[in-house]
Structures are given as C-alpha cells and as structure tokens.
Amino acid sequence: MVRRKSSVQLRVLTKMTPVCPFVKAARPDDASSRKPSENQNKQQTGHESKVKQESGDSASISPKCPFGYDSQTFKLGPFSCMICQALLFQCSKCLPCSHVYCKACISRFKDCPLCGADIEKTEADTNLQDVVDRFIDGHARIKRSQVDTDQKEVAGEKKTVIYEDVSLERGAFLVQQAMRAFRANNIESAKSRLSLCAEDIREQIERMGNTSELCSQLGAVLGMLGDCCRALGDAGSAVNYFEESVNFLEKVSTDDLEIKHTLSVSLNKIGDLKYYDGDLQAARSYYCQGLNVRRNAIKHHSTVPSQILDVAISLAKVADVDKNLGNEDVAVDGFEEGIKLLEGLKLNSEEVGLEQRRLSVLEFFNGQLPKKQHD
C-alpha cells in the first residue's frame, strides 16, 4: 500500500454538532467560480506542462483522478445524489423514468424530484454503485512518481504515476461527503463514508504509530460515527464509538482548545446516553470527566468566553444528575457555581450566539434553584 502523506488537522465542533475534522477544503464548485483571467492562466500553465511532458520532463506529469475528477473540479454529476448532494449510496433507480438517487433519499418521495414522474417502483442499480465505489477508492490518489535523479532515464520511456493524494486528502473528501449526507438525514450514507475514513486512519496509525495528528483525526471521526449511530437509534454502538473517540483523544498531549472541546463533548455524549438509559451514576461519572477536562482548559484560557460557557454547561449536567439522585445540597452548589460563572462572563456585542447560549443556560440554572423565602 502506498503511504499517503497526511495534510489534515483536527477541526472541532463549537455547537456540539458534527464538523469536518480536516483542514478546510476547497468547495467542489470553486472551479466554476474562478475569474476568466484565472482560467486563462490555468490553460496557459496546462499548455506549458504539456510541452514539458512531451520533451521528457518528468516533473511536469499532471496528476489527475483516475475517473476524470479532482478536488477542484468535482461537481454534482452522474455519481451524485441530487437530493443529499453527496456521492450515491445504495443506488436506487426510479421506474419508469430511470433517474437514480440514494435509496434512503428517494424513499421519502412518491414522484421523481428531477422530472416529476410518478414513481411506480424503485430497483437497485448495482452497476452504477460499483462505479461509485471504485471512484471513492481511487479518488485523489494519483501523484507524480518520485524519479531518482541519479538514474538515467531511458529516452522515450513511458512515465509511471502512483496513486496518492494530491489536492484533496482522501479523508477530507470522505468526511465532506459524509457531512452532506448527514445534513440531508441520509445517515447510513454518512456512516459508510466515515467508516471508510476511520479505516484509512487506522491503517496510517499501524504504519506510523499513535501520532498526535492521527489520534486527533481518528478521535474526531469516531465521534461523528457515534453521532450517526445515535441518530439511527443504536445507543450501544454510539457509546462504543464515543468511548473509542475518548481513548484516542486522550492520547493527544496538547493544550489545543479544540481537541479538549471535542474530548469533553464525547464524554458528555456518553453521559447523555447513560442518562437516557437510566444509569444516573454512570452518567454522573462521564459528566464529571467532561467537567474536569473543561476546568483544566480554562486554567490557561480563563478569558475565552466559549470555554467558560463550556464549564457552565458541564456544571449544569452534573448538578442535574445530583438533583435526580437526591443530592440536593450538592446540586445547589453546582447550580450556584454555574450562575456565578455566567453572570461574570463579559461578551462583546458581536458575540450574539454566545450571549443567547449564556442566557439560555442561565435561565436553566435559575429554574433549578429552590425559591428563596422573602421576609
């Protein structure tokens, strides 16, 4: 297997929703929005590369996706579902119009979203799905071969290319497709893409070891897989994914606030699932772990409003469990600590979203405290 050079970096949620953990990739339609002058320059560069290639300059070999796509030109097309705007998953053909969508997407419709024809029935299009799967397997994996400058090249010898990531790392591509599917509620498709991404990262870990970058990537992707399982109602698998996410994120020795936030979110989500399952003691244990992570984060970042808000939210979770367990005094202490943090939090006028969250959590805290007796 060719070793892929990783160029990804953890990106974390700010509102406890799945977010791509990789570097921000170019939008698939960026190529079509380029200015004419940019396109002319690109054509000129391409012409120059062709001339050099014909003259035997190996450095000019232009890497391209084996299916005719690359990350700068990929658009919605024959491999994409027009409903979720992600790559097709479990291709289903509408009859009689023959338009193809993801099985989960088209199952919500009685007529074709493209042509409006009544759907008499749908059938699996396994041939097209095989092509899509091969596309995913080969996408963004070609690069120019490394030529040993000490070796003399044979004149006229055909240059070889190696499948490798070029402009968009495969993991980023898979997560991009998963996020599109998740937003369109095609959860099975999202889960499938994220599973492929997790397998890729595990293979890299086997070769390179538990590096901070790979552990942070895998931790984030596993957390997103947990979200998929939770959305599908599979609480057991969701807990397993979140726990594995925690395991890898804890291997990352860093003060990166985003990683700490992701770690605390995974811990809180396990706590939520335990809470809904009626296991309050287990829920409290995970909530407390999340609270400790967030307390440690604000030791060195005490002026970051989002971190203070995170601590207040964790305090609310722990205190709520204490209240349900009958530990009223402990719960009151937690609620009062949270109120003190939120009342002392100073936000700028631009931070409207944080202010709304602050007021919402503060309202919850005040609603949980026993009414004070007035003289």
Image (spheres, rainbow, N blue to C red):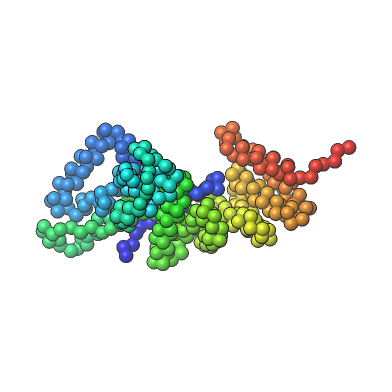
Q: Position of residue 183 (x, y in %)?
A: 47, 45
Identify the residue at image location x=21%, y=40%: 43
Q: Is residue 117 left or right of residue 149?
A: right
* Residue 52 shows up from this direction: yes
Q: Is residue 226 left or right of residue 201?
A: right
Identify the residue at image location x=31%, y=63%: 2
Q: Is residue 99 left or right of residue 146?
A: right
Q: Quadrant of residue 268?
A: bottom right
Q: Position of residue 261 (x, y in %)?
A: 56, 51
Residue nearer the viewer, 54 or 359: 359
Q: Quadrant of residue 346?
A: top right
Identify the residue at image location x=60%, y=42%: 305
Q: Quadrant of residue 97?
A: top left
Residue at the farthest front position = 120
Residue nearer the viewer, 338 or 70: 70
155 relative to 40, above or below? below
- Image quadrant for the C terminus? top right
Residue nearer the viewer, 302 or 242: 242
* Residue 285 shows up from this direction: no
Residue at the farthest left position = 155
Identify the residue at image location x=30%, y=52%: 128
- Image quadrant for the N terminus? bottom left
Residue nearer the viewer, 184 or 216: 184
Residue at the farthest right position = 375
Q: Position of residue 348 (x, y in %)?
A: 59, 35
Q: Position of residue 180 (x, y in %)?
A: 43, 46
Q: Is residue 163 left or right of residue 9?
A: left
